[in-house]
Image: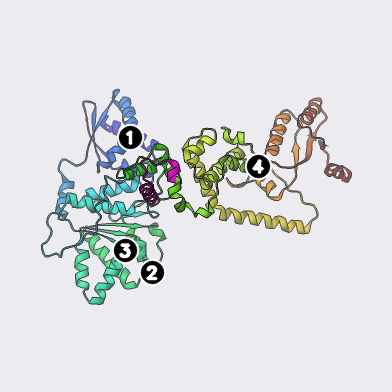
Amino acid sequence: MSQEANFWARVLELAQKQIKKNTYDYFVSGARLMKVENFQATVLLDSPVKQLFWDQNLADVIITAGFEIYNDQITVHYIFQEENDEVTQSTNTNHSVVKPSLPPIETGLKAKYTFDNFVQGDGNVWALSAALAVSENLATTYNPLFIYGGPGLGKTHLLNAIGNQILENIPDARVKYIPAETFINDFLEHLRLGEMESFKRTYRSLDLLLIDDIQSLGGKKVSTQEEFFNTFNALHGDNKQIVLTSDRSPDHLDNLEERLVTRFKWGLTQNITPPDFETRIAILRNKIEDLDYIFPNDTLEYLAGQFDSNVRDLEGALNDISLMARVKNLKEITIDAAAEAIRARKQDASQILVIPIDKIQTEVGNFYGVSVKEMKGSRRVQNIVLARQVAMYLARELTDNSLPKIGREFGGKDHTTVIHAHGKIKTMLEMDDNLRLEIENIKKHYDDLKKKYSNILVEGAGGLYVPLIRDKFYIYDLIKLFNLPVVLVCGTKVGAINHTMLTLNAINTMGIKLEGLVFNNYKGQFFEDDNIKVILELSKIKNYMIIKNGQKEISDEEIETFFN
């Protein structure tokens, strides 16, 4: 194997170890090493958009492989087409001349939506990259491209950006953007008028068809789906580009023919998720450029913290603020002004409760048996972490405070910690239906036992932190659910003091009632006596029982004395 081949093999090996498989497949697998000359590697990428990813994520990989193979630093020069210009020729072949006999077409595109003003974030980077790739090479990269996600996340923006970019590059290209509902109405109108040939000529002569909200096609008449199926086949068979958006993935499209769903998955499917905090800040900065008001950083952070589901909420909030600013003749938008402007959007004014963060911390702490000081600290004990996250979640939901402000109230935590806590508790709540059913099942079994027996002994095998439902429900949760008193069974050997006191501390912190201690497997050795004495002195516990090694039974009198 040549030195160049060894170098490239090492680059790919390191990249596979460093990034996830789907990321590798999209950004790296298609790359080619053309040559290494004068310690510069020439790398072929199939799209210029991928260079940014390589620059940001694989620079260290190139350097490492360079020193390993060449014992020197290797720089990179990126190119984006083969020397024989096959890609260009292919593109020009598909879009060289528009037949003059074709009817004129209304594009339906909105000029304001471009790639330049689309704000990239972690939630949309893959969809954006795919859209850029399509806009550079129609029907040669991903066909169809299927983008799905919730409302207000930028799907319509990307559709229009693709169309606008194509018309900029290929002015005579036949491009049409249309919501699925409009496509349906257009089809039915042409069918009613007996003008189906005109309909077919319009749609099947396109170079690029952009359909928004394709889920609207579900449940419509068979004839409607049949026509779209035929239109799809005609365009795809003629090597023309199709881009679709939906509020859900192809596999979850209801009332759509299977043959359509299958075709939607022929190309590339990409998801768009809600923007993270940093992306929302960037979106707001982009949107306020056209406004005549000053937005301090803390106001932007506050707004980004209030709306985390989609971009439309952010745009609506800015509209509310602009209206209020005009009425009150404001020049600078403070947090208080922003809060007043968006209050109605967040919730009805009559329902607003002003709850201080410290009150939330106190109530949550009382519930979980955790002090406010512990909540503000950095300890990672499970019950403290849960209490801290719940309090952050409630502070985010029940107050108008910005994420940085909430973070400061929890001992100077970063706003990303608040975002993580809110997301985790929100996810837990969304999954709670299953958890609730499982817990209700546990309760039912317990209630059935109570009806049968006067006394029930619940064995907490393994200790307080043993999970009954992984990551959701633990022995200590069971104890608190049924308000069970605890009998702590402890050893007497070396290490007994530490183990017992740590468990007693956890029980006390959680607010669990302790019935007493049982010292098990006692052999009468002098250090055992000393261990028992120290535990009782430290814990101040008076109620205890000692079970000797080999002891088979406990008398009724001992049991009665212990529990009474």
Q: Please say whether residue 426 is visible from this viewpoint.
A: yes
Q: Could you tell me the amino acid type at mark 2?
A: Gly
Q: Residues within 10 Å of mark 3 (few under 14, many from 20)?
A: many
Q: Mark 3 or 4, which is nearer the eye?
A: 4
On the image, numbered disc 4 is attached to which residue? 366
- Residue 563 placed where, x, y %? 83, 44
Element assignment for label 1: helix
What amino acid is found at the position of numbered circle 4 in the picture? Asn
- In the image: residue 317, left or right of residue 500: left
Q: Is residue 186 above or below residue 368?
A: below
State which quarter of the image contains the N terminus.
top left
Dot 3: element = helix
* Tag 3 residue: 180
Report the magenta residues as a range: 313-338
- Disc 1 crowd rating (10 Å Cα; few below 14, some 14-19, many 20+) is few
Foreground disc of the pair 3, 2: 3
Q: Describe residue 120's horizontal placement relative to residue 512 as left or right.
A: left
Q: Nearer the viewer, mark 4 or mark 1?
A: 4
Determine which residue is flagged by label 2: 219
Circle 3/circle 1 CB separation < 8 Å: no
Q: Earlier in the sequence, mark 4 or mark 2?
A: 2
Residue closest to the eye, 363 or 343: 343
In percent of the image, x 42 and y 38: which residue is there? Answer: 298
Question: Which residue corresponds to mark 1?
Answer: 56
